[in-house]
Image: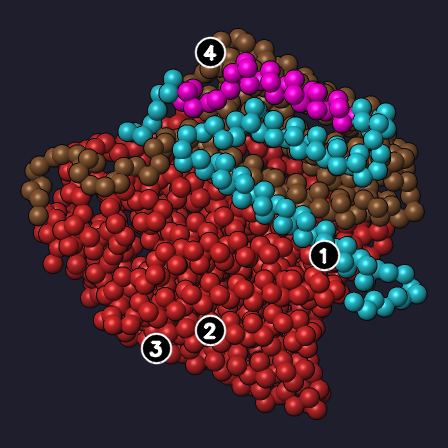
Chain colours: A red, B cyan, C brown
């Protein structure tokens, strides 16, 4: 009746019970609050059923925040365990729990924090920067968010019901096959990724069409902001890489559920093919993550240097080259799997080459600042932290790209330090910069700058302390994913240092979260009184009020050069057409959320082999899809008069007349 | 919405006609039959047979892309066409690369128990 | 600065301020979006093809493609699908010419051809399984069933979609949304015939040589 789900699934080790308790309590608190404030109707009509990308973007970031807490808790647990578990002592986590923790940490951080934050920002920023009112497919946009959230929920459920995968964030077979991991862990991992991956692919198509087809008059490709270019390249990577993941996970699923022999040790299976395919996806994936990060910096550095971006054309070429190259380097993730010098050298050289366009981008940012008027706001501080840490991590990447070196440090803590330099130093710091930079646009007030700085210094010191020793540990022979080691290795002092670093990062993250609530509480003090343009912005999102109206632009702008808002301020832009028009706004719909819900049911049922429930979930999805695709293209209408009323209430009069201070 | 088009305008954006479907159908019929015939009658063998049927298959794919899927007939900018070509490039890299890598691994890792050590 | 009361159109006065893409309507966006989805499906099939290529000799001691594949069956499947691709196109052509009854007719013919394709394929599969050559016997069989089966799954989804289209056209006739969906469906259906070319070439024909 319940497949292989039994009451045993609810029994956990002590260390896990605490996490489950926290999760349940938090959920109850949120529900309780909503009941107390009687805000269900508001939640439903303003948020859950919305098709407005600005709202969807905010929801992404809320889910990301929750998943970040989970992923970071995993990190703290690992660091604490490794600092304590030496010689006689075995720390406080069992070996199998530790395996679940590192698998969950990687999965959560990459798929939910990384991808989620990026899609959140794309939703918020892309339509505004291209002068559009919406994305190309508003319903699909909402659907993609709900699929993402369904996958996140499945991940959270795996904490409480049964075990998560113990096979790492990429689940190599034969360990991840049904022979060596027969229980529900790997199945949870598979369905979480398939549901999230579907959402990502849908968003990839959506944003690609949006950028290609919905740019405002005059915005040719070479006049787009670099953030939009970086999103374009990232989405191209999404649509071509994610199908590889889908197919590979599908084959692993068939191995596990239908006894097939793709990646098994027997029957003619080839586990190496899995490694090959998963990295053919995996390498583009890391560029999917980092390119929007680069794009954010290309917005922030010129604005806070009061100087246009140096080398726009070379920036575009660098992005395009990185996009292409990211498809021809994937073997560097498995140099040690046994390929010959021909294969390994080819991919080693390609990997080294990809550093060149990346370097071009870094030099361009530096040249942008040269002779500019640099403002050391916290986004700019995050850029400096990026510069230091991403560059160090990048250089160790070049070291790793030489197979002879890689053979020594593959899967050691040296590797771990390298890629955390990339994702934390590179991606996370850029995301923090972007979050602070764009926060006033969507809320109308600033984040507390002093708390931003405290958080920044905690993150920077914490990161250096938590990851630089890992390079040393890697050279000293420490492999990754170790939950216990002998005192004679001499690693213990370094692991203690690393744990302290993690603790300092925890302080930074705590300050950020508390700072968010603090800033909301004090928003009247931190109000943006400039009417939407606090940083003397260059791009179109700063030309409308904060927060923007639902339709973004009452009048679609016309653009004739890069940095269009600076052009307007200099009086060099084409004057706008001043008549308001009727605006069609996509209707709200709960169908995206329903499909997400049915996907969650389907995923959970498949994990536990509750096939009748899986069929119900599947049929639910089909019915919703047919319902949604049988509509009549209906929209809500906002008349020109209503638009005019909204505009006149929002804009200070001097901005309406087109005068900028 | 000012950018929405009427049904008649939309119909003009679809590029099919009796002609395109007849050409597509007849060419596919001929190319398919040719492939099957070559294999059944063994008119060619070995490498040449393989190249022939791959060539016939690719030719038929091109005909179907043009006459059924109307590739290249959209108005400028021809996004569908350019992204199709890029997809083709990536596909060749992923498939070709995988075959190269896996055959290399096969030679080196999956050789039989009398380990032959290659010095090259 | 300009007087905000003046209203004039600027496109002639400034260089290159025309719409970067003249077609921003829902039809163009949807067709491009669906085309992009089809390209993702190309990569999905490519992954399955690559896996089949790597594993097609791994028969684990059992029979291989030469012993198991039947060219007559593959040929009939090919013809059924090719014909259905043509009739699908003719359905859209009828929609363009406002011949509603013909649309439904052509769609029903397409459905029967597609259903016959699936029936043939299911027979082929069940015969193999009954003779002891199921997908769990070797990597070769796993990859064969998965590659061809995934294509068959797509065709089956297409059959369901076709029923929905037949219903929509019967009830609502040819409107902007239903025409758009019909075109999108035809892209999907044509794409499946395109993938089949590669299946019968690389799996069946090459398998029998």
Judging from the image, mark 3 belongs to the subunit labelled A
Nearer the viewer's eye, disc 4 or disc 3?
A: 4
Labels 1, 2: one chain:
no
Q: Tell me the SS state at disc 3.
A: helix
Left/right of residue A359 with respect to residue C161 in the rendered view: left
Judging from the image, mark 1 belongs to the subunit labelled B
Q: Tell me the SS state at disc 4.
A: loop
Residue drawn at (43%, 24%), measured in percent from left and top?
B13
For the residues labelled 1 and 2, the Cα–Cα distance comes to 30 Å
Q: Give the camera-side residue of B32 and C139.
A: B32
- The answer to whether marks 4 and 1 mark residues whose Cβ atoms lie closer than 8 Å is no
For the residues labelled 1 and 3, the Cα–Cα distance comes to 49 Å
Q: Give the camera-side residue of A362 and A452.
A: A362
Q: Where does the magenta region start and end?
A: B10-36
Picture coordinates of residue C84, whole percent (x, y): 65, 19
Q: Give the camera-side residue of B59 and B108.
A: B59
Q: Which residue in the protein does label 4 denote?
A: C97
The quadrant of the picture occupied by the N terminus of chain A is top right
Picture coordinates of residue A201, whole percent (x, y): 53, 45
Q: Tell me the SS state at disc 1.
A: helix
Q: Which mark is residue A391?
A: 2
Q: Which residue in the protein does label 3 denote?
A: A454
Q: Which residue in the protein does label 1 denote?
A: B101
């Amino acid at each position: 009746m319940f497949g292989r789900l039994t009451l045993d699934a609810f029994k956990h080790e002590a260390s896990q019970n605490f996490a489950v308790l926290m999760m349940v309590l938090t959920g109850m608190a949120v529900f309780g609050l909503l009941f107390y404030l009687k805000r269900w109707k508001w939640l439903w009509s303003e948020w859950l059923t919305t098709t407005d990308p600005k709202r969807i973007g905010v929801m992404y970031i809320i889910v990301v925040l929750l998943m970040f807490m989970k992923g970071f808790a995993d990190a703290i647990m690992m660091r604490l365990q490794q600092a304590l578990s030496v010689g006689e002592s075995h720390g406080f986590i069992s070996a199998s729990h530790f395996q679940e923790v590192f698998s969950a940490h990687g999965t959560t951080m990459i798929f939910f924090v990384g991808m989620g934050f990026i899609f959140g920002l794309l939703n918020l920023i892309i339509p505004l920067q291209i002068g559009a009112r919406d994305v190309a497919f508003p319903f699909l946009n909402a659907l993609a968010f709900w699929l993402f959230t369904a996958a996140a929920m499945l991940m959270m459920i795996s904490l409480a019901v049964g075990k998560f995968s113990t096979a790492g964030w990429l689940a190599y077979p034969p360990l991840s096959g049904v022979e060596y991991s027969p229980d529900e862990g790997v199945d949870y991992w598979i369905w979480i990724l398939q549901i999230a991956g579907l959402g990502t692919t849908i968003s990839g198509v959506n944003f690609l069409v949006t950028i290609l087809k919905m740019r405002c008059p005059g915005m040719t490709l070479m006049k787009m902001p670099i953030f939009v270019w970086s999103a374009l390249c990232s989405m191209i990577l999404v649509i071509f890489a994610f199908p590889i993941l889908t197919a590979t996970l599908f084959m692993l699923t068939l191995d596990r559920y239908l006894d097939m022999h793709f990646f098994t040790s027997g029957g003619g299976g080839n586990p190496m093919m899995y490694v090959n395919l998963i990295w053919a996806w995996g390498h583009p994936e890391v560029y999917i993550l980092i390119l929007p990060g680069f794009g954010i910096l290309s917005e922030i550095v010129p604005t806070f240097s009061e100087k246009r971006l140096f080398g726009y054309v070379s920036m575009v070429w660098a992005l395009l080259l990185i996009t292409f190259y990211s498809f021809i380097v994937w073997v560097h993730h498995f140099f040690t799997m046994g390929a010959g010098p021909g294969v390994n050298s080819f991919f080693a050289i390609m990997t080294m080459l990809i550093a060149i366009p990346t370097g071009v981008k870094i030099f361009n940012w530096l040249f942008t600042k040269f002779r500019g008027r640099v403002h050391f706001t916290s986004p700019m501080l995050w850029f400096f932290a990026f510069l230091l840490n991403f560059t160090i991590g990048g250089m160790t990447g070049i070291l790793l790209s030489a197979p002879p070196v890689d053979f020594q440090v593959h899967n050691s803590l040296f590797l771990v330090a390298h890629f955390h330099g990339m994702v934390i130093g590179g991606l996370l710091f850029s995301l923090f910069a972007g979050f602070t930079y764009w926060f006033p646009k969507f809320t109308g007030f600033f984040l507390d700058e002093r708390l931003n700085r405290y958080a920044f210094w905690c993150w920077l010191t914490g990161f250096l302390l938590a990851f630089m020793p890992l390079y040393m540990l890697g050279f000293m022979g420490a492999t990754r994913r170790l939950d216990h080691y002998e005192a004679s290795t001499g690693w213990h002092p370094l692991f203690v240092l690393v744990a302290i670093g993690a603790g300092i990062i925890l302080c930074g993250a705590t300050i950020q979260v508390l700072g968010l609530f603090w800033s909301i509480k004090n928003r009247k003090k931190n109000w943006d009184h400039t009417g939407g343009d606090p940083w003397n912005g260059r791009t179109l999102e700063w030309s409308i009020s904060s927060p923007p109206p639902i339709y973004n632009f009452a009048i679609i702008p016309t653009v004739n050069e890069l940095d269009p808002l600076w052009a307007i301020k200099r009086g060099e832009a084409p004057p706008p057409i001043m008549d308001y028009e009727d605006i069609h706004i996509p209707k709200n719909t709960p169908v995206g959320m329903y499909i997400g819900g049915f996907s969650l049911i389907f995923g959970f049922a498949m994990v536990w082999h509750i096939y009748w429930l899986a069929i119900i979930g599947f049929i639910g999805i089909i019915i919703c899809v047919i319902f949604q695709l049988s509509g009549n293209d209906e929209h809500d209408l906002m008349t020109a008069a209503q638009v005019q009323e909204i505009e006149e209430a929002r804009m200070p009069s001097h901005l309406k007349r087109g005068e900028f201070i | 919405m000012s950018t929405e088009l009427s049904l008649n305008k939309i119909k003009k954006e679809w590029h099919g006609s009796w002609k395109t479907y007849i050409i597509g159908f007849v060419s596919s019929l001929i190319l398919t039959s040719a492939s099957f015939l070559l294999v059944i009658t063994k008119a060619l063998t070995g490498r040449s047979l393989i190249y022939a049927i791959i060539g016939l298959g690719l030719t038929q794919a091109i005909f179907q892309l043009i006459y059924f899927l109307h590739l290249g007939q959209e108005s400028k900018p021809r996004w569908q066409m350019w992204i199709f070509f890029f997809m083709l490039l990536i596909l060749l890299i992923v498939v070709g690369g995988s075959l190269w890598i896996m055959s290399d691994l096969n030679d080196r890792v999956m050789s039989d128990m009398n380990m032959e050590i290659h010095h090259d | 600065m300009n007087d905000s009361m003046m209203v004039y159109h600027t496109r002639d006065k400034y260089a290159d301020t025309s719409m970067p893409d003249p077609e921003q309507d829902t039809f163009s966006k949807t067709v491009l979006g669906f085309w992009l989805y089809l390209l993702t499906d190309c990569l999905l099939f490519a992954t399955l093809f690559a896996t089949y290529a790597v594993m097609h000799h791994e028969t684990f001691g059992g029979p291989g493609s030469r012993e198991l594949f039947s060219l007559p069956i593959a040929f009939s499947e090919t013809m059924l699908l090719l014909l259905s691709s043509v009739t699908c196109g003719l359905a859209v052509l009828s929609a363009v010419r406002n011949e509603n009854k013909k649309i439904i007719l052509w769609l029903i013919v397409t459905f029967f051809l597609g259903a016959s394709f699936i029936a043939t394929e299911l027979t082929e599969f069940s015969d193999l399984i009954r003779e002891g050559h199921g997908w769990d016997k070797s990597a070769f069989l796993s990859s064969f069933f998965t590659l061809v089966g995934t294509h068959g799954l797509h065709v089956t989804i297409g059959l369901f979609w076709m029923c929905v289209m037949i219903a929509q056209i019967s009830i609502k006739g040819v409107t902007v949304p239903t025409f758009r969906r019909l075109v999108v469906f035809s892209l999907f259906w044509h794409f499946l015939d395109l993938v089949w070319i590669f299946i019968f070439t690389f799996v069946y024909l090459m398998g029998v040589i």
